[in-house]
Amino acid sequence: MNDATLSLLYSKERIADEVSRLAQEINRDYAGSEILVVGILKGSFLFIADLVRQITVPMTIDFMRMASYGTETQSSGIVELRKDIELPVQGKHLLIIEDIVDSGLTLDTLYAKLMLKNPRSLKICTLIEKSCAREGTIKPDYVGISMDSGFIVGYGLDFNEQYRQLQDIFILE
Ligand code: IMP
Ligand code: MG
């Protein structure tokens, strides 16, 4: 693992620009409403922290944690709920905050679970969307950066729980 090579892909300045743009879109779309932000742990923890500080509509925040099994860089498609949401969802405008949508299977599972709780609306915001090999059916409403392929780390994203603390996003070679 120590011989993994990291190459800079998205700088912290690029990330900050995308976060600001997303916050502006969210502020515009939800003007006059209150939202319940649902952060998906662990990968989105830095994105959530940066994004919510630029959202100006009233909000409450809760977290869920999902885990998908598989090899180190490939999802198996089996998605497990590790921590459920605790705040009441019924009648709320939910905004899911994800780090990355890859196969889309995590998102499909999340979406189905939350829709059962009768939110007033449910939208998804992801920092990164991988455009290749999409298996899921649910599309994110807000996308920071679209990328083709490759495994990335940093700004919350991990490889074997490493590299989450990095300020920029790197491609793992
Ligand atoms: P899914 O394939 O869309 O279900 O994504 C499952 C999860 O795999 C994501 O929430 C991430 O935690 C992880 N993941 C997918 N692609 C990457 C990547 O390039 N780097 C780090 N984690 C990733
Ligand atoms: Mg992960």
Image: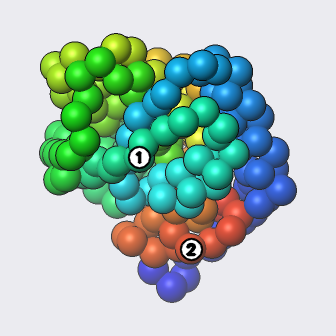
Above-or-below relation of 170 to 139: below
Q: Position of residue 64 (x, y in %)?
A: 28, 48
> Taking 140 as reference, is 40 above or below it?
below
- Decide which of 2, 22 is in the foreground and name it: 22
Instruction: Choose top left, top right, bottom left or bottom right for residue 120.
Output: top left
Number of other residues with Cα within 10 Å of mark 1, as a class: few under 14, some 14 to 19, many 20 or more: some
Q: Which is more N-terminal, label 2 or label 1?
A: 1
Residue at 38% over, 59% down: 42
Q: Nearer the viewer, mark 1 or mark 2?
A: 1
Q: Where is the N terminus found, in terms of image quarters?
A: bottom left
Residue 141 seen in render: yes
Q: Is mark 2 within 8 Å of ligand 1?
A: no
In the picture shown, does residue 118 fall above or below 64?
above
Judged from the image, the secondary structure of the residue bearing numbered disc 2 is loop
User: Which residue is rendered at x = 18% and y = 23% of the image?
Assistant: 117
Would you name the residue on which mark 2 appears?
A: 165
Q: Which residue is labeled 1 in the image?
A: 61
Q: Position of residue 40 (x, y in %)?
A: 37, 47
- Which label number is shown at residue 10? none
Q: Residues within 10 Å of mark 2 (few under 14, many from 20)?
A: few
Q: Secondary structure at mark 1?
A: strand
Which colour scheme appears in the figure? rainbow
Query: Identity of the amino acid at label 2?
Result: Gln
Residue 60: give x, y in percent of width and height.
42, 42
Type of amino acid under label 1? Ile
In the image, residue 128 sits, relative to residue 49, either above or below, namely: above
The alpha-carbon separation of the residues under discs 1 and 2 comes to 22 Å
Left or right: 62, with 51 as reference point: left
Residue drawn where x is 66% and y is 59% of the image: 169
Residue plotted at (62% across, 47% down): 51
Residue 122: image quadrant is: top left
